[in-house]
Each structure stands twice: as structure tokens, then as C-alpha cells.
Amino acid sequence: MSIFWRKHGVRLYKPEKACVGYTLISSHTFNDAWLLDMEGNYVHRWTFPYKARNHGVLLPNGNLLYAMAAPLPADENDVSVPRVGSWGTGGGLLEVSWEGNLVWKHVDKCQSHSFYRMRSGNTIYPRVVRVPDDIARKVRSGIPGTEDRGMIWTDGLREVTPDNKIVWEWSALDHLDPDIHIMCPLSLRADWTHMNSIEELPDGNILTNFRNISSTWIIDKATGKVIWDWGRGEVSHQHAPTMLDNGNILMFDNGMHRQNDSLMCYSRAVEVNPKTNKIEWEYKADPPQSFYSSLLANCQRLPNGNTLICEAMRGRVFEVTTDGEIVWEYMNPFYRPHTSPFQGQRSLLGWQTSNQIFRAYRYTPDYAGLKGKDLSPENLKWVNQLYGSEVY
């Protein structure tokens, strides 16, 4: 059976080929997150005390961890937080229970984009770091004159305990070379690197990603040294790398401002072998430009070998087999007036309303975080009547 009659919600479903589970979405900058089943019924909703910034993840304990949004500093002279850029700067992290009650909170106005709950129970996250003026002058490329009040920012990492003690810090400044790590010429110079993801690897090292220099790094946690630096000339403005069970790394290659494909912009999911630096698998559409998310987005390898892909800018999430067959597809029906971190660019970009989804994740029914949970569509009957099963 295939579902294909909806403009929004689940538009395609091939049960015999798809990986059954519950998909977590959070519309970009909304105050809530949703779990939906394979047929597009919403089965759980979290409503946050603070506006979510980017995305949330369901932890094995059944709690939801997400980044909260905070306003930019009102004082033009406050140089502790950037004012211009697209970092997704948050304000800190919140963990809430299944019922939405506050469990843990960490405040840091320089927190940006992502986070990761480590095996130790600590939490590691990216944060913006100001580039000293003597180094900033050497940063190459980017749009001239787009610094933040004359400043350039890069990224660092911070690890905190459950009681909010800082136990480890790292700065990209110690490992960047302005002659090698050259910005995309069409990026704002205020934002040299733009770290957008973080993951603790099985050996304890750290996998992270820099959009504006098209580089994915593995950091030796013990020494802080960069032991893998890949991506330039292969991917462009990529997001959300994750290590697979086979040791390869899966990521979303956004494809904005590609250097090796003339003027064509298209996205793809790629799986790269970090030992050989060869791409061993990819998914892209036919024609390629029919699948494209210039910003945001992620992909996730599912237990049955399929790949879940979030085409963020369109609010589209879909699942593909290893040979590229689409077996499940969802279009986000939740729209809101778009607000941009770029001052004055709403009219420039033409975004009036948006259904963007920063990232999406699929959790199988045996996932620990779902154990004992009531996942009946009847819990959100009013939502499902409006968005879950109606024909548009």
C-alpha cells in the first residue's frame, strides 16, 4: 500500500520497504516539536518554555534535548555575542521530560546550532569564538565589508557536566590556517567557519563540521589535534556528518556555491570512507537540481539500511533505499512568517512564510526513549483532523 494523495503530511509510504518508526520534527524557530507515525499521524507534542532554535533530539531516557533561542544583545557595543550572521546562536540548552517539564538547563548565549549528549552523561556543544584582529586580517575570501562591526567569528567546543561545570574546551583558532581554510566567496566574512554539528565517536574522539569552509573534521579528544580534515572540492556547505557502524561518515552535501559543477546547485546525501577519502555511496535526484536545500538539513542511516533525508528548506523529509528508491515522504504542513538572523534580508530572500525543518530523526519502536510511552494518534486528535489525514 502506498499513500500519495496529500499535498502535506505523509505523501508516500511503501510499508514493505520503509523502516517503521516515529519521526521527530521541529519546524525551524517554532516553540514545539512533534513525533509522527509512518502514516503521518501526530502522536506526541512538546511545547517549549522557550522558542526552540534549530532542532531537538529524543534521548534514550525519553527526554527531549534542544537548544533554546535568545535575543541578540541590544547594546551595539556588546561584543560578547555576534550580531550579524547565521550561526543559529542559541542561548543555551534545555532538557525536558516527555510531559514537557524542565529537567536540565545550561545557559550560554554563545551556544550555536547543535549539541550532543555524551556517553558519560556530559553534554558537548559548539559555541562562537571571536577571531583576534591580527588573524582576522588574514582570513581570505567572503563578501567584502560583511564583518560584524569589524569583527570575524569562528567556533569552539565546550563540554559541561549535568551540574553545569565546564570540564573541556577547544577552539578552532588553534587549528585553522587562513591560507588553507578559505571561506566561500559568497559567505559573510563575519562568520569564518560556521560549525553546525557535533558527535562523540565510539573511540571518544569528536566529529564536527564547518559549513563556510566546506570541511569536516575529526578531533582527537585527548590532544585537541585535528586528525581528519576532508571536504574541500568534494562537498559544499555540508551539514550533519555522522559516523556509521562501518566506520564511514554520512553527511548532507547541501551543494550551495559548488566549485566543480559550473552554476548548478543541487544537494545529495554522501557516505565517505575516512580511511580512503572516497565517496562510497550517494543519493541525488534526477535531475539533480530537483533536490536542493541550500541551508540546514541532515540525513540518517536507518537500521534496515535505508537513509532518512531532511530537505530542510522545503520542509520535506523522505526515506530512500540503497538504490535510491523513495519509500516514504513527508511535507511539513506547519508554516509561519519567516524571521531571518540576517537583518533586512527577509524581502531580499523573498521568504514570506516558511515550513523549514532544520533536522529530522527516525526512532524505531524498540528505541529506549519510547519504551512505555503512549503513542496513540487519539492523543492529538485535533491536530490529526487538521493536518494528519485530510486531503489537501
Image (cartoon, rainbow, N blue to C red):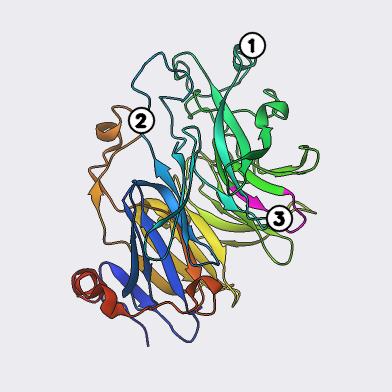
Q: CA distance from mark 3 to mark 1?
A: 34 Å
The stretch of residues the image draws in magenta is 198-205
Q: SS of the residue at dot 1?
A: helix
Task: Give the overall secondary structure of the magenta segment.
Answer: loop
Going by the numbered disc 1, the residue's amino acid type is Asp
- Choose between 274 and 32: the one closer to the eye: 32
Q: CA distance from mark 1 to mark 2?
A: 26 Å
| Residue at position x 34%, y 46% in the image | 50
Q: Which residue is mark 1?
A: 134
Q: CA distance from mark 3 to mark 2?
A: 34 Å
Give the quadrant of the N terminus: bottom left
Residue 273, position in %: x, y? 73, 57
- Chain-order first, disc 1 or disc 2: 1
Q: Which residue is mark 3?
A: 201
Q: Nearer the viewer, mark 3 or mark 1?
A: 3
Residue 336 placement, left or right of 223: left
Residue 288 in view: yes
Q: Is residue 201 magenta?
A: yes
Going by the numbered disc 3, the residue's amino acid type is Leu
- Choose between 321 and 356: the one closer to the eye: 356
